[in-house]
């Protein structure tokens, strides 16, 4: 069973790389099999077709993200430290975020069947809702502990979710890898400062 799981993870990793490099439309099961070091027929033992494999790639990325967020936050005490971990993992996974953004914006999304489009949208909405839930819980606790002023927590959690995701996606899309690495720490501090202190001069 463990060996079967390892093979499935290998396929998912290879599929993500091929989808990212070639786009969904131009990616083929043959290319994915070659990247995974497996025969093409092996892929069909785990996934029905390319769309099924793609949906599993989306789910795998979302599952990894939230598992990492929970794991990293568990050892942190302060609100600042917890937000730092959320922003950091978002930065680290910006390549995946950028891929899914381009997938929706530049046409590949429309190549999917209606059912697969629905599944993709549901996964992405669920992904966003979980992100909002995590921030909502942190902001509510921050307000109770007196770390944050009284705010509309629902609005703040939704706005902050979209702000972090959009910024990290933009940086991943607009800058080269070297520039991104150089600026990540600085950007993260600025994001956290903005979340905790805003831009007003009290």
Image: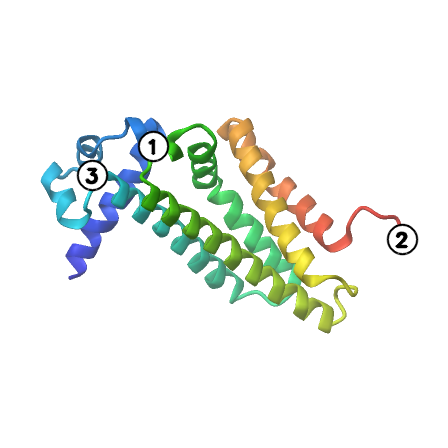
Q: Are marks 3 and 1 in contact (CB under 8 Å)?
A: no
**120 in relation to 149, above or below:** above
Residue drawn 35% across the image and 29% down it: 23
| C-alpha distance separating marks 1 and 2 | 51 Å
- Residue 202 is labelled as 2
The nearer-to-camera label among 3 and 1 is 1
Helix or strand or loop: what does disc 3 sit on? Answer: helix
Who is closer to the viewer here, 81 or 86? 86
| C-alpha distance separating marks 2 and 3 | 56 Å
| C-alpha distance separating marks 3 and 1 | 24 Å
Residue that sits furthest to the front in the current view: 114
Residue drawn 57% across the image and 65% down it: 76
Number of residues whose C-alpha sits closer than 10 Å to that of mark 1, classed few (under 14), some (14–19) or many (20 or more): few
Q: How is the image coloured?
A: rainbow
- Residue 111 is labelled as 1
Which numbered disc, 1 or 2, marks the residue that appears first in the sequence?
Answer: 1
Give the residue pinned by disc 3: 36
Give the image quarter of residue 140: bottom right
User: Residue 67 in the image: x percent, y percent?
Assistant: 42, 60
């Amino acid at each position: 069973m463990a060996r079967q799981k390892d093979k499935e993870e290998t396929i998912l990793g290879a599929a993500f790389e091929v989808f990212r490099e070639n786009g969904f439309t131009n990616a083929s099961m043959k290319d994915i099999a070659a990247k995974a070091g497996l025969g093409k027929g092996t892929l069909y033992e785990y996934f029905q077709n390319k769309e099924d494999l793609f949906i599993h790639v989306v789910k795998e990325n979302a599952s990894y993200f939230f598992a990492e967020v929970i794991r990293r936050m568990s050892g942190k005490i302060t609100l600042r430290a917890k937000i730092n971990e959320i922003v950091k993992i978002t930065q680290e996974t910006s390549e995946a975020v950028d891929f899914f953004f381009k997938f929706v914006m530049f046409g590949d999304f429309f190549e999917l069947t209606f059912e697969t489009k629905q599944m993709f949208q549901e996964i992405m909405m669920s992904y966003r809702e979980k992100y909002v839930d995590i921030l909502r819980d942190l902001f509510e606790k921050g307000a109770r502990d007196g770390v944050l002023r009284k705010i509309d927590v629902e609005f703040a959690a939704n706005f902050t979710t979209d702000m972090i995701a959009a910024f990290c996606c933009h940086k991943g899309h607009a800058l080269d890898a070297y520039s991104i690495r150089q600026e990540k720490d600085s950007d993260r501090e600025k994001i956290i400062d903005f979340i905790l202190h805003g831009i007003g001069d009290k």
